[in-house]
Amino acid sequence: MTGRLTALDAARRIADGSLTSEALVRACLERIRAREPVVQAWQHLDMDAALMMARQVDRFGSGPLKGIPVGVKDIIDTADMPTGYGSSLYETFRPPRDAACVALARLAGALILGKTVTTEFAYFQPGKTRNPHDPDRTPGGSSSGSAAAVASGMVPLAFGTQTAGSIIRPASFCGCVGYKPTFGLIDRSGVHPFADSLDTVGVFATTVGDAAFFASVIAGRPNLRIKDEVFRPRIGLTRPYAWEAAEPATARALDEAAARLGTVGLEVCEVALPERWRGLLEAQKTIMAFEAARSHAPEMLTASDRLSMKLRELLEAGVLIAPEDYDAARALVAEARAGFSDVLDGFDVLLTPSAPGEAPEGLGATGDPVFNRMWTALGVPCISVPGLTGPTGMPIGVQVVGRWGDDRRALAASAAIGQSLS
Amino acid sequence: MTGRLTALDAARRIADGSLTSEALVRACLERIRAREPVVQAWQHLDMDAALMMARQVDRFGSGPLKGIPVGVKDIIDTADMPTGYGSSLYETFRPPRDAACVALARLAGALILGKTVTTEFAYFQPGKTRNPHDPDRTPGGSSSGSAAAVASGMVPLAFGTQTAGSIIRPASFCGCVGYKPTFGLIDRSGVHPFADSLDTVGVFATTVGDAAFFASVIAGRPNLRIKDEVFRPRIGLTRPYAWEAAEPATARALDEAAARLGTVGLEVCEVALPERWRGLLEAQKTIMAFEAARSHAPEMLTASDRLSMKLRELLEAGVLIAPEDYDAARALVAEARAGFSDVLDGFDVLLTPSAPGEAPEGLGATGDPVFNRMWTALGVPCISVPGLTGPTGMPIGVQVVGRWGDDRRALAASAAIGQSLS
């Protein structure tokens, strides 16, 4: 059962010599052999190469992530593996260097197991991945493969990225932890750009402790690690803008989370978001379309016919957005960023839905990031914490939102919340 | 003399049929043949290919930049030309796609003439370029080739990037216009990253009108273009922090600029920068080193021995910066960004030095960005306006600084200031 160890346990056991990276990778590969035919989480995975690397790491590796296998969303560059960005345009592309986050993982001793499926350029056109809990449902996107691989026990840790809801939503749908850090906490070099002021690198794990451990190493921020001491967060329960998008499953999950937190004596109070920031949802869409239209100019110049309809529509809409409207959207975001701490006054974190409901049926779409857009625009840390289920038994996550730059507290609160829910 | 046309004049003449792109490119190539043996501005230039492209553009091209040749700093990706980032590590690299700014230029009809020399990864290790006014002096960096090529009449427009002072300083040393827009105004996709929260794409031109025209097209912001109407900016003269770094040449140039502006009746008043933001200079250095250490993890992982000593020292220092110190630097920048508009109260722009003096002698270093760091950290628009000379006859620019997002006014003021100085 080494494949079901947490990353923290595995790292401890590799460090004390009671586990090898090779054994851990073998367990992962075994799990992948069993589940991959259905789940389809991997875009590139060379099992022999992975085992060879594991033996190398066992002999020569060092660092806090020594020997721990990591999945990398295929929107992120890897020098030793193809990197396809989910688009036929890059089918044969091999980047000249790793992305910074991949290199930082390797420098810390991690073993890059393979590339996980991304939607096309991390937008809405789905890849092949299925939800590990029901192959007829979407895993969510755009970090579809990373979420599905971690949730199905194929790999303990994986990188994802979020521009709207691409980490939190699939984590909720697949039933693992997704952590979108404060904007910029993990370096983005070598991540294919979508929208410059929104794109954020984050991680997937099976526990909040693992997510915090992984991110702390990559970002070089030891204080993100979850301490053993008891932390009793003050929690603000928030029904976000566009609450009408919430299905009964999500409304019930939020109530159930609050109830369970109450039973362990954690203070949960309702917090209303200020009316004046309702525009954040539209602002995020405006910023994303405007910036994507510019960052994808190369594809529009040379190969627009090889983009999905969904993406082409966004880019064409983005070109038509008046700069004044974009500037107004950025100004609203800046104002809300400055004022957001006050909304949290008296609380450590907000508790709010990760997604509108259970993973939708069908594989033609990846679900709605409506409950993620404003937080990504604000750049604040978000963690999707699993533990609840919906009416059909599918996982439903709750989203923990912290203050800009206060990832430590957001993670610590998420760990406490996760314990109460599981 | 077509090679000395402004880009605006050339665009008008190409549009009305009185000039072809081929003739314009021929004039540029003639100038390059004459000056390149000494100036060494180009990293890659295929003259036959350029002429072939020009004929193509004449037949099939369209757009506001139709047929206008553009130089591209070799830190910026081009799909049809090698892209070396100023490092032996990328000597043979050919990116799979253009950077966004290059594609946007092509979509507007521009002709990418070639790649201009950058320092190593746009940091301090110089390339081969010499100052066009004195081959024994540095052109400045890191956008060495773009500044030198435009200043010596080889190409009317060029792209550069700035993380500390890589546009404004070489523009001042070489005697052309350098424009670093508000952070994010021109999309950065496909620009090799150095420091994520500082890297900014900008342009070089021979007039402020051309720089505004070029940037307006690339950013899709028509209102950046300089209007014919008279604009009489209210100007705050600022002796920046670390004024002791200013050589007499720069101190005199600033006084002379103020005097000339006074004689044409423009109001110039001294403005003191608040003491509490003196730390911005160090904050920029902290942010740059911390972020560069992360973004260059791939090079540190695989090829640190092929980095220059200068860069390696920065990266090693960056690794040692405590996250708390980086966060404090970012917090100071955020506070200053929010308050900077007040410093400009009653003024349209600030007038401040572009560089400590004339281009330093020698080719082993690219000069000091001390008068650029804080403005880059603030993310505000900066324009280096030429017209003055130092004691040995070398050009000296003055720097015009505007409010965040108010590039239109900063450019209009720079145009008015440029007229008074020339």
Image: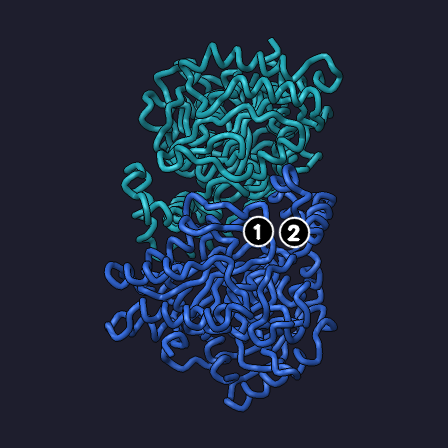
Chain colours: A blue, B cyan
The chain under label 1 reads: A
Residue drawn where x is 50% and y is 72% of the image = A35
Between B319 and B22, the one lying in front of the other is B22
- Quadrant position of the C terminus of chain B in the picture: top right
Q: Check contact, mark 2 vs mark 1: CB within 8 A.
A: yes
The amino acid marked with disc number 2 is Ile
Q: What label sits on residue A287 in the rendered view?
A: 2
Instruction: Tell me which amino acid carries mark 1.
Output: Ser
**Can residue B409 be seen here?**
no
**Residue wearing tag 1:** A197
Whole-percent x and y of residue B131?
Answer: 41, 19
Tag 2, which secondary structure?
helix
Q: Residue B33 at x, y = what percent?
A: 48, 12
Going by the image, does A410 lie left or right of B326? right
> Residue A372: x and y, percent?
62, 65
User: Does any portion of residue B247 appear in the rendered image?
Assistant: yes
Task: Judge whether B110 appears above or below A338 on screen.
Answer: above
**Residue occupying image coordinates x 69% and y 47%:** A315
Kindly identify the residue that appears in the image at 52 percent across and 70 percent down: A383
Q: Quadrant of the N terminus of chain B?
A: top right
Q: CA distance from mark 2 to mark 1?
A: 8 Å
The local crowd at label 2, few if under 14, some if 14 to 19, many if 20 or more residues have their Cα within 10 Å, is many
Q: Is residue A282 above or below residue B277?
A: below
Q: Nearer the viewer, residue B14 or B4?
A: B14
Residue B367 versus residue B26 in the image, above or below: below
Which chain does the numbered disc 2 sit on?
A
